[in-house]
Image (spheres, helix red, strand yellow):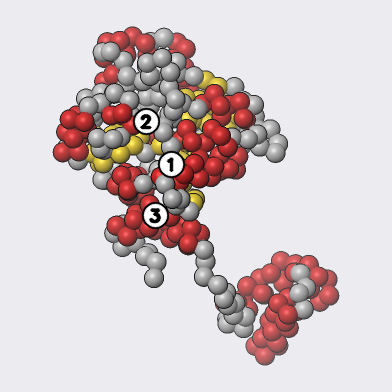
């Protein structure tokens, strides 16, 4: 086929598809070609400028930010919700988005890991069964006992929504001593759950910040003074009670030897980690988690996403 004939074919295909509204299959049948050939030729028409597509409206803010986050940090997925009038309402919006994403990512024989967190707990009102039941297992990744109850633990609610069994860690998240932790880790039931936690395919976790109002301080696990000391040592956030710095390197805390949780190297090895975070105090933890590739997906709000992108080195900033 000569260059002239080839160009005429591309132009003809372009008019048939974009002006006449014919599908790839209809064009293929009409011209006695394969549908794959039609698709490839239409793609070439776009590459060569025969077809130019103009979108007359700008991309909505949250979707624009999602694209920038994914490209800048190599994320498999970024989900950005509109910031609401209050942080409380914004966290609800994130909880709703996380619940929807949960239904998208579970798959047959999936082991779903869950870490307790203020933000992750916002998923509860929006948990719904998927359209088709998926056989999976929910595994707690950190001790779930905080005094008499843990208002931030939602593994049971997620398991109920998915109609899936749950593997709980019904032990204090922080033991009284290292000896007590070592003893409880020898219990076969506890050891098995932590072993299964190491085999998680997907994990939903919150990103904690380093501040006097952080969840760990409010729940009494750490004092404001201890948190300030961690900040001086370079810590910017925590994930499953393990602290990390701006380079996503692990920094041991005063609780390190007493925590019942996955260790840092295991956390880094989970194939798909979904991190939930919103608000000014979560910008530094997010920057570290994204730059260090701790998370493969983040769910946040427009205000937080804009701050992260504006502070990220060589970020693709919005015009």
State the separation of the CA atoms marked 3 and 1: 14 Å
Q: Dots 3 and 1: beta carbons under 8 Å?
A: no
Q: Give the image location of residue 87, x and y in percent.
A: 41, 45
The residue wearing badge 1 is 88
Q: How far across and how far down the image is residue 268, in percent? A: 38, 37
- Residue 14 lies, in percent from the top left, at 70, 79
- For marks 3 and 1, the one nearer the N-term is 1
Q: Quarter of the image containing the N terminus?
A: bottom right
The answer to whether any part of residue 246 appears in the image is yes
Q: Residues within 10 Å of mark 3 (few under 14, many from 20)?
A: some
Q: Mark 3 highlights which residue?
A: 303
**Secondary structure of the residue carrying numbered label 2:** loop
Q: Nearer the viewer, mark 2 or mark 3?
A: 3
Tally of numbered discs: 3
For the C terminus, the quadrant is bottom left
Q: Within 10 angstroms of label 2, few (less than 14), some, or many (20 or more) residues?
A: many
Find residue 291 and name its label.
none
- Can you say whether 241 is above or below 9 in the image? above
Tag 2 residue: 240
Locate residue 120 relative to residue 6 in the image: left or right. Answer: left
Residue 108 horizontal side relative to residue 268, left or right: right
Badge 1 element:
helix
Residue displayed at 50% across by 45% down? 93
- What residue do we see at 38% from left, 19% from top? 146
Q: Residues within 10 Å of mark 1 (few under 14, many from 20)?
A: some
Q: Earlier in the sequence, mark 2 or mark 3?
A: 2
Q: Gap between marks 2 and 3, in whole Å?
A: 25 Å
Comes first in the chain, label 2 or label 1: 1
Q: Is residue 220 left or right of residue 26?
A: left
Image coordinates of residue 156 in percent, x first then y, are: 54, 23
């Amino acid at each position: 086929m000569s260059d002239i004939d080839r160009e005429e074919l591309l132009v003809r295909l372009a008019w048939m598809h974009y002006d006449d509204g014919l599908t790839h299959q209809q064009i293929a049948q009409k011209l006695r070609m394969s549908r794959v050939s039609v698709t490839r030729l239409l793609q070439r028409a776009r590459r060569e400028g025969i077809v130019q597509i103009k979108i007359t409206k700008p991309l909505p803010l949250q979707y624009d930010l999602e694209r920038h986050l994914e490209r800048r940090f190599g994320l498999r997925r970024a989900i950005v919700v509109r910031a609401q009038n209050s942080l409380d309402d914004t966290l609800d919006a994130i909880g709703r988005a996380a619940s929807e994403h949960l239904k998208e990512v579970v798959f047959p024989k999936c082991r779903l890991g869950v870490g307790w967190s203020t933000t992750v707990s916002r998923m509860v009102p929006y948990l719904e069964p998927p359209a088709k039941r998926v056989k999976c297992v929910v595994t707690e990744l950190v001790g779930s006992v905080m005094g008499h109850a843990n208002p931030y633990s939602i593994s049971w609610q997620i398991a109920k929504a998915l109609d899936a069994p749950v593997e709980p860690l019904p032990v204090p998240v922080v033991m009284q001593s290292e000896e007590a932790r070592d003893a409880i880790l020898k219990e076969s039931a506890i050891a098995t759950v932590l072993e299964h936690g190491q085999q998680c395919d997907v994990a939903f976790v919150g990103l904690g910040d380093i501040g006097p109002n952080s969840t760990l301080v409010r729940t009494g696990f750490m004092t404001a003074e201890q948190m300030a000391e961690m900040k001086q040592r370079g810590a910017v956030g925590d994930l499953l009670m393990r602290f990390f710095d701006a380079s996503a390197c692990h920094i041991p805390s005063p609780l390190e030897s007493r925590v019942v949780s996955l260790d840092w190297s295991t956390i880094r090895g989970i194939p798909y980690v979904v991190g939930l975070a919103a608000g000014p105090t979560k910008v530094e933890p997010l920057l570290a988690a994204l730059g260090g590739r701790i998370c493969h997906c983040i769910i946040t709000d427009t205000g937080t996403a804009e701050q992260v992108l504006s502070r990220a080195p060589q970020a693709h900033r919005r015009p």
